[in-house]
Amino acid sequence: MNHKHRKVLHALFAHPASANLSPKSVESVLKELGAEFEQRHGGRWGVRLNGHFAEFSHSGHALAPQQVRQIAKYVSGAGIDPERDYPL
């Protein structure tokens, strides 16, 4: 995982939640972690990572802080700890 991906991964877990993460950069990080994506109905996308599945809405320019927290919770539940697994 390159430095840019690590920074985005750590931004997912920052407090307060970041309000300027682009969906494309988060998708790129999740793919780097091994996630598989599928298009869903209504502008949503499904993500499968380490046997865990979640569905998220696909926003336009930046993820809302609530979406960032949801993705961070999902990544954490899939067994990824950025501090332990991918330190800066």
Image: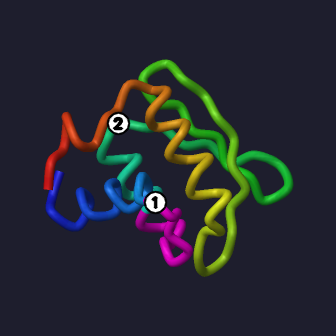
Q: Quadrant of residue 82?
A: top left
Magenta region, residue range: 15-25
Q: Position of residue 87 (x, y in %)?
A: 15, 48
Q: Position of residue 42 (x, y in %)?
A: 85, 55
Labelled disc at residue 77: none
Report the front residue among 48 and 82: 82
Callout 2 secondary element: loop
Which residue does the numbered mark 1 point to in the structure image? 15
Q: What amino acid is at disc 1?
A: His
- Nearer to the camera, 67 or 57: 67
Residue at 32 percent of width and 40 percent of height:
33
CB atoms of marks 1 and 2 within 8 Å: no
Residue found 54% across the figure and 36% down from its top: 74
Q: Outermost residue toward the front? A: 15
Most common secondary structure along the magenta stretch: loop
Residue at (60% x, 28% y) in the render = 53
Image height check: is 49 above or below 8? Answer: above
Instruction: Give how far across and how far down residue 52 sits, in percent.
Output: 54, 23
Question: Residue 13: where, in percent of width, then height?
Answer: 42, 52
Question: Is 19 within the magenta?
Answer: yes
Q: Is residue 10 left or right of residue 17?
A: left
Q: Is residue 81 magenta?
A: no
Q: Is residue 29 above or below residue 34?
A: below
Mark 2, residue position: 34
Query: In whole angstroms, how far apart are the C-alphas of marks 1 and 2?
Result: 25 Å
Could you tell me which secondary element the residue under label 1 belongs to? loop
Residue at x-position 83% and y-position 49%: 41
Q: Amino acid at mark 2?
A: Gly
Circle 1 crowding by C-alpha within 10 Å: few under 14, some 14–19, many from 20:
few
The foreground one among 61 and 39 is 61
The C terminus appears in which quarter of the rendering? bottom left
Circle 2 Cα neighbour tier, 10 Å, few/some/many (<14 / 14–19 / ≥20): few
